[in-house]
Amino acid sequence: MSDEISRLKDEEKEKVIEVNKEDLDNSQQTISSGPASAVSTHKNWVGGVILIAIGVIFLFTNLSGFHLNNWWALFILIPAVSNFASAWENYRHNGRLTKSGRGSITGGLILSLIAFTFIFEWSWGVIWPVFLIIGGIGALLGGWFD
């Protein structure tokens, strides 16, 4: 009985090793040829552009004397630009604007509006209807293209 248990354990170990080798081979093929490598490159590119843009804005404020009171609101633009980039990639991949792409555009517009409201010190009492307009446009696009 002890020999049979040992044999079963050895067989199980061999099966686990075979399954792990197959998973590793499949994941390497996906990484080298699939969209995962393009996505990681895309995110690095977007992050670099965002950092350069923020640096240029800070340099402009230092050289021109223009004072930006709510400079921290520029960081709200990071996920907004990422949403726009995601929508663009979605459009390029599918050849049309899908539900996911429309959601990314809507989210990017809302985050951009929030950031610009802080940066330019717009009144929330005046700006809030624009959020409704963005939501309505998103709903119209969703009903129109689905």
Image: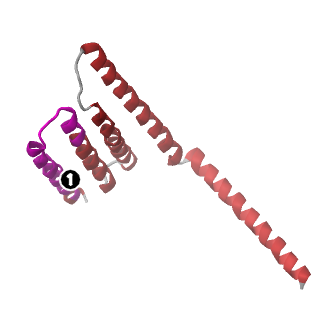
Is 22 on the left or on the right of 135, as rendered?
Answer: right
Secondary structure predominantly adopted by residues drawn in magenta: helix
Is 127 on the left or on the right of 90, as rendered?
Answer: left
Looking at the rendering, in which quadrant would you find the C terminus?
A: bottom left
Residue identified by numbered label 1: 138
In the picture as drawn, the residue positioned furthest to the right comes out as: 3
> Callout 1: 10 Å neighbours few (<14), some, many (20+)?
some
Q: Which residues are magenta?
A: 114-142
Identify the residue at horizontal 69%, vertical 59% (top origin): 22
Q: Nearer the viewer, residue 103 or 64?
A: 64
Helix, strand, or loop for circle 1?
Answer: helix
**Total marks placed:** 1
Magenta span has 118? yes
Identify which amino acid the numbered label 1 is placed on.
Answer: Gly
Q: Nearer the viewer, residue 50 or 92?
A: 50
In the picture as drawn, the residue positioned furthest to the front comes out as: 69
Note whether 29 is above or below 13 in the view shown: above
Magenta span has 136? yes
In the figure, residue 119 lies in which quadrant? top left
Note whether 32 is above or below 62 in the view shown: below
Is 73 on the left or on the right of 51, as rendered?
Answer: left
Residue 15: x percent and y percent? 76, 68
Identify the residue at horizontal 58%, vertical 51% (top origin): 30
